[in-house]
Amino acid sequence: MATPVIAANAYAQAAKIADAAASINKAAGVGSATEGPSFGAVLKDALAEVHATGAKSDAQARNMVAGSNKANIIDVVTAVAETETAINTLVSVRDRVVASYQQIMQMTI
């Protein structure tokens, strides 16, 4: 069953995002902001990874429909599940960013 592989990939993506966030926090707390990647760069990389995962899923589905010997139904289902996991992770991050923004906007100065 491909579920452990999907979970491992999701955890790996979450770890990449966490590592990038940790380097941003370190850069903000210790020195200048030029020491680590910017928040915009981290988001851009995350979006690029989600897009690449979606493109891989689309390519697998197209190969399956075309009857290519390279495509296997298990590979297609795995690619679609990975894309779904990546999109769910991205939506969760977006929701947290929006919630944080709203919380900041409600602060009194």
Image (spheres, rainbow, N blue to C red):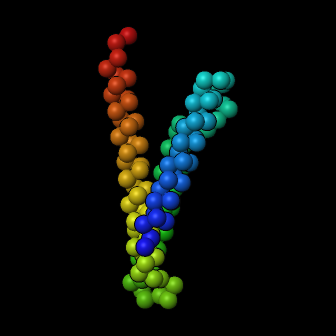
Q: Residue at x 34, y 12 (%)?
A: 108
User: Residue 94's x, y, as percent?
Assistant: 39, 42
Q: Determine whether 86 is above or below 44 in the image.
A: below
Q: Determine whether 97 is above or below 92 in the image.
A: above
Q: Residue at x 41, y 81 (%)?
A: 73
Q: Residue at x 50, y 49 (%)?
A: 14
Q: Determine whether 1 is above or below 45 in the image.
A: below
- Viewer-closest of 51 and 93: 93
User: Residue 51's x, y, as percent?
Assistant: 47, 59
User: Residue 82's x, y, as percent?
Assistant: 44, 63
**Residue 46 visible to the viewer:** no
Report the residue that reaches farthest toward the top: 109
- Viewer-closest of 81 and 8: 8
Please state, as top left, top right, bottom left or bottom right, where the N terminus lies in the image. Answer: bottom left
Q: Determine whether 68 is above or below 84 in the image.
A: below
Q: Answer with left or right where residue 45 lies relative to residue 94.
A: right
**Residue 47 visible to the viewer:** yes
Q: Answer with left or right where residue 5 lies relative to residue 99.
A: right
User: Residue 17's x, y, as percent?
Assistant: 53, 45
| Residue 61: quarter of image | bottom left
Please state, as top left, top right, bottom left or bottom right, where the C terminus lies in the image. Answer: top left
Q: Residue at x 41, y 50 (%)?
A: 89
Count of marks overlaid on the render: 0
